[in-house]
Amino acid sequence: MSIIKKQYLIFSLLLVLSVLLGTTVKADGQLGSTHTQDLVIVKYGLNKNSNSFSESQTTNTGEKINNIPIDNNGNQLKPLAGVQYSIQKIEPTDDGNKVNLSNGSTYWKVGSSQTIVTGADGVASLVLSDGFYIVSELANKSIRLTTPATPVLLRTPVVNEMNNGYLDTVYIYPKSSIDPVKVTPVPKKTRPGVLPKTGDQLNFDLTIVGLVALLIALSLMVVKVRKRGKK
């Protein structure tokens, strides 16, 4: 093999290696510290006569639910505003990337948590980089949310089940209900000088009092008539 052919072969190998290495770096850049996606939380509240959400809408796949959210009775749900969510980034303590939210030793927190609030449309959103996150719904007595939804472990990027690649927007639909409004009965107003009715015993007592008063009045009239007759 001539020297020129050897030089050409070495140059070709270097060119192939440079292309392969360049592709690898580009892929790492797309899915890593520089890759981001939108997290969208959509919150609906159960109606007062509802017990649970529709079974077809109880699984979070990360994709948007295009149909109208309903409860187990087929009633349309209403968006819930003012619900707060804490987004905490974490890292697994083991190389196996196994995180158990009930076991704090399987992960540690990275930085401070971020809080987002649903608007009038029941939607709250945040841009997230790739990694592990704990999405926690916060209790809020002002909107009667005393039992928050179970915290969700989110790992991004999320695989697009319909197409190849990853979801640019990840949707989460937390499941929880608000406490029913307590209705306090309003007491009936009574006219001044009129006793409220409290039962048959009160009516009987009033009748006795009236009869006694009538007898006293008649007795006084009889006494006056007798006095006039003596004069």
Image: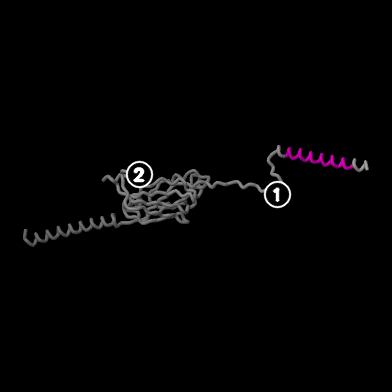
Residue 227 is situated, as x and y percent measured from the top left of the image, at: 90, 42
Tally the numbered discs. 2
Q: Secondary structure at mark 1?
A: loop
**Any part of residue 164 in sight:** no
Give the x, y percent position of residue 218.
84, 40
Q: Amino acid at mark 1?
A: Pro
Quarter of the picture holding the N terminus: bottom left
User: As rendered, which of 229 and 98 lies closer to the eye?
Assistant: 229
Q: Which residues are magenta?
A: 203-225
Q: The C terminus is located in which quarter?
A: top right
Kind of residue sitting beneath label 2 = Leu
Single out the mark in the foreground, 1 or 2: 1
Q: Tell me if mark 1 has few (under 14), some (14-19) or many (20+) residues whose alpha carbon lies within 10 angstroms of its own.
A: few
Q: Secondary structure at mark 2?
A: loop
**Residue at the extreme bottom of the image, as rendered:** 4
Rounded to the nearest angstrom, the CA distance separating label 1 from label 2 is 64 Å
The residue carrying mark 2 is: 101
Left or right? Give the position of 80 relative to 61: right
Q: Quadrant of residue 147?
A: top left
The image's mark for residue 192 is 1
